[in-house]
Amino acid sequence: NAGVTQTPKFRVLKTGQSMTLLCAQDMNHEYMYWYRQDPGMGLRLIHYSVGEGTTAKGEVPDGYNVSRLKKQNFLLGLESAAPSQTSVYFCASSPRDRANYGYTFGSGTRLTVV
Amino acid sequence: KNEVEQSPQNLTAQEGEFITINCSYSVGISALHWLQQHPGGGIVSLFMLSSGKKKHGRLIATINIQEKHSSLHITASHPRDSAVYICAAATFSGGGADGLTFGKGTHLIIQP
């Protein structure tokens, strides 16, 4: 009964390095989302996916790329990390009928870019 | 775009006190979510409600659709209730991709 699993949980990057955050869900959900959480702000949507092979931009997509090659996985990539990308990143998933079944969130990835 | 305001931003109370956290939103919604985030932890969904009231243990969530307002109550608060509580307004027609607009959260500390 894992739900939504995010790896890694913590990471420190140097400016300019790249990395990939992995989100995996075992609930057969169609929709998946990546958010960032910054102090004093609500969660903001980076990218989302409504199905395998499809992705779209959210509110703050610049500097990030995503891929969803398999239904259960949603990857968030930082090609050239910047200090402004220091944040806590959350992944979430939902069934298509999210109005009735809501969302499931992961435990977060705490990323520091120095 | 929906705007979601939470109050208070910070709340410190003594163990056993009755806690109320408020959430107001500007546009009609499909549902209102209450989420809980423990320090350094993940986000857990507490309630999703579109009308009336829901109760789970010591937690109660209410919503007034006409007034565009929701409240989260904690009865007999305990130090383990210390967390950030986030409300999120869901709009599934014409809204953002995830349909969610999040409040900034209420940081609750319950002292023994």
Image (cartoon, rainbow, N blue to C red):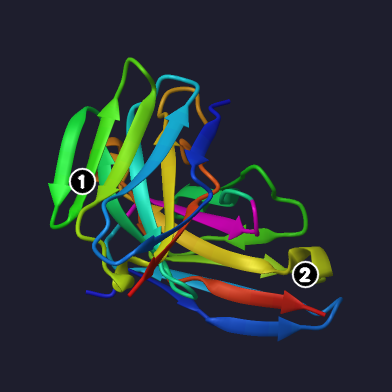
Residue A25 image point, x, y percent: 36, 67
Residue located at (39% from left, 22% from top): B68
Q: Horizontally, is A41 left or right of B52 in the view? A: right
Quadrant holding the C terminus of chain B: bottom left
- Amino acid type at mark 1: Ile
What secondary structure is found at the residue carrying circle 1? strand
Chain identifier of the residue bearing label 2 in the image: A
Q: Amino acid at mark 2?
A: Glu
One can see residue B97 in this view: no
Left or right position of B106 against A71: right
Viewer-side label of 2, 1: 1
Label 2 Cα crowd, 10 Å radius (few <14 / some 14-19 / many 20+): some
Q: Is residue A27 left or right of residue B1?
A: left
Q: As displayed, is residue A79 above or below residue A101? A: below
**In the picture provided, is B3 more to the left or to the right than A62?**
left
Which residue is identified by label 2? A79
Residue A74 highlighted magenta (yes or no): no
Residue A101 place in picture, x, y as percent? 24, 45
Above or below for B92 versus B106: above
For label 1, the crowd category at 10 Å Cα-Cα, with few meaning under 14, some 14 to 19 and many 20 or more, is: some
CA separation in Å, label 2 and label 1: 44 Å
Whether tag 2 and tag 1 are in contact, CB under 8 A, the answer is: no
The residue lying toward the viewer, choosing from B66 and A98, is B66
Instruction: Tell me the residue at 24%/35% (across/down).
Output: B62
Q: Which residue is mark 1?
A: B60
Closer to the camera, A16 or B100? B100
Q: Tell me where the magenta segment starts and ends, as one range.
A: A29-40
Counting from the top left corner in percent of width and height, residue B78 is at: 26, 68
On the image, which quarter does residue A4 sit in? bottom left
